[in-house]
Image: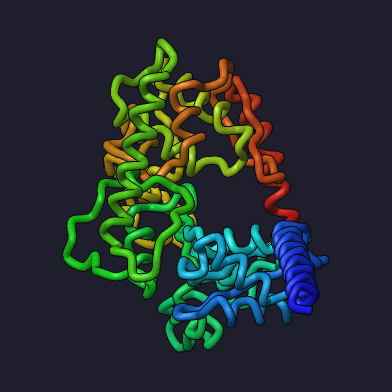
């Protein structure tokens, strides 16, 4: 009898062990197999969250079928205590193992809210946008101008400003002045520190680019990053300059690049515009470019907002390139990488003149007669637009 009981018990134990091993094998397969998620979702993990809370959230989103297996797998792989706060893009069909790795390895959030602060030539705009997991494209939720008189800060921005996983990006446009960048940064309440009373960076020395920052990053450190980036660009491009340029220093390159930047917004024209100015410099002709005169009037502060007066075109300002010869005494804006490259590697052209052509670009000419004909065409376009 006892032998029978013992035999049955042993058999039962073997069956249980086999079943348990089967459950474990099934659990491992489920943990590593493709998940049920049919469309990518954004998973937000608040600070102080737990694996149980996260697994329940994932299950409600349809990303996992078995929350308990998810937690067991995370614990078995020693990742249960490594949960990171943030917003994470969970891709379609992601396995539980992949999701566990995603939310425990750390690093920047991969979805959720992003605040983009765009510093343009004339003004700065704050934009709050959310990533649409289905399209992997950002959708704007609100846009406003910080510090605008009589306009309250939108609640949509105030809400995300206090969230730990909100990401921030500062975009500096090509052709901005140092004054515009510094004044705009003063209005960025997600940055800490103050540029009040600090010595202004030199004109042209803040690299136009996209800068990812953390909430409450020091504004002086950001400005230093911009300066270091611009200096690195200058050093790199100057070392690759072509022979026979009509200027001798990196500072001259920066000055010419800033003029090119202000004269055209068409990428394909930069080297042509550079060729016009360098052909003029080689022939001893004055540059005769309006942006330098405007800078002499505004000193880079604000926007002129009107046409140039005859008195300004005849002034003895060192930036009046209708009167002075050669380059002005310094840059008139922050040029981008492409304009710096164009300054030291211009197209080989015979052009000495250019004027707007009505399409956003310019008509180039070798002779004054050709140029005057192009000017007449441009005046006709201006008149037609004024009459509409």
**Is 321 or 264 nearer to us in this picture?**
264
**Total tally of numbered discs in the picture:** 0
Q: Residue at x 36, y 65 (%)?
A: 185
Q: Quadrant of the N terminus?
A: bottom right
**In this rendering, position of residue 98 left or right of residue 185:** right
Q: Quadrant of the C terminus?
A: bottom right
| Residue 372 against residue 302 in the figure, above or below | above
**Is 163 or 62 nearer to us in this picture?**
62
**Is 11 or 73 nearer to us in this picture?**
11
Q: Residue at x 60, y 63 (%)?
A: 100
| Residue 240 against residue 287 in the figure, above or below | above
x%, y% of residue 375?
64, 38
Q: Quadrant of residue 264?
A: top right
**In this rendering, position of residue 297 left or right of residue 168:** left
**Is 224 or 271 nearer to us in this picture?**
224
| Residue 336 against residue 144 in the figure, above or below | above
**In this rendering, position of residue 265 left or right of residue 149:** right
Residue 123 seen anywhere in this rendered image of the structure: no
x%, y% of residue 190?
38, 72
Q: Quadrant of residue 93?
A: bottom right
Q: Residue at x 73, y 81 (%)?
A: 60
Residue 3 seen anywhere in this rendered image of the structure: yes
x%, y% of residue 291?
44, 45
Q: Residue at x 45, y 88 (%)?
A: 150
x%, y% of residue 96?
68, 64
| Residue 154 against residue 385 in the figure, above or below | below
Colour treatment of the image:
rainbow
The residue lying furthest to the front in this view is 1
């Amino acid at each position: 009898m006892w032998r029978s009981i013992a035999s049955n018990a042993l058999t039962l134990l073997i069956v249980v062990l086999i079943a348990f091993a089967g459950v474990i094998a099934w659990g491992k397969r489920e943990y590593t197999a493709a998940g049920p998620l049919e469309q990518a979702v954004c998973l937000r993990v608040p600070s102080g969250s737990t694996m149980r809370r996260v697994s329940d959230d994932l299950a409600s989103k349809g990303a996992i079928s078995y929350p308990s297996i998810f937690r067991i797998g995370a614990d078995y792989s020693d990742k249960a205590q490594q949960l990171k706060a943030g917003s994470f893009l969970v891709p379609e069909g992601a396995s539980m193992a992949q999701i566990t790795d995603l939310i425990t390895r750390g690093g920047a959030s991969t979805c959720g809210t992003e605040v983009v602060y765009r510093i343009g030539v004339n003004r700065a705009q704050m934009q709050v946008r959310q990533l649409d997991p289905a399209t992997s494209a950002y959708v704007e939720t609100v846009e406003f101008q910080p510090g605008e008189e009589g306009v309250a800060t939108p609640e949509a921005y105030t809400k995300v400003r206090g969230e730990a996983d909100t990401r921030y990006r500062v975009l500096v446009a090509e052709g901005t002045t140092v004054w515009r960048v510094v004044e705009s940064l003063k209005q960025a309440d997600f940055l800490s520190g103050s540029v009040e009373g600090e010595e202004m960076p030199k004109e042209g020395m803040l690299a136009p680019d996209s800068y990812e920052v953390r909430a409450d990053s020091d504004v002086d450190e950001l400005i230093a990053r911009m300066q270091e980036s611009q200096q690195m660009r200058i050093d790199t491009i100057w070392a690759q300059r072509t022979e026979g340029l009509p200027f001798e220093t990196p500072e001259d390159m920066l000055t010419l690049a800033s003029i090119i930047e202000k004269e055209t917004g068409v990428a394909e024209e930069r080297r042509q515009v550079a060729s016009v100015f360098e052909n003029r410099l080689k022939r001893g002709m004055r540059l005769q470019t309006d942006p330098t005169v405007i800078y002499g009037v505004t000193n880079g502060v604000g926007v002129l907002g009107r046409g140039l007066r005859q008195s300004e075109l005849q002034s003895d300002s060192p930036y009046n390139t209708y009167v002075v010869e050669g380059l002005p005494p310094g840059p008139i804006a922050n040029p981008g990488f492409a304009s710096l490259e164009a300054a030291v590697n211009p197209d080989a052209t015979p052009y000495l003149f250019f004027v707007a052509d009505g399409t956003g670009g310019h008509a180039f000419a070798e002779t004054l007669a050709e140029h005057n004909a192009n000017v007449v065409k441009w005046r006709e376009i201006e008149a037609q637009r004024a009459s509409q």
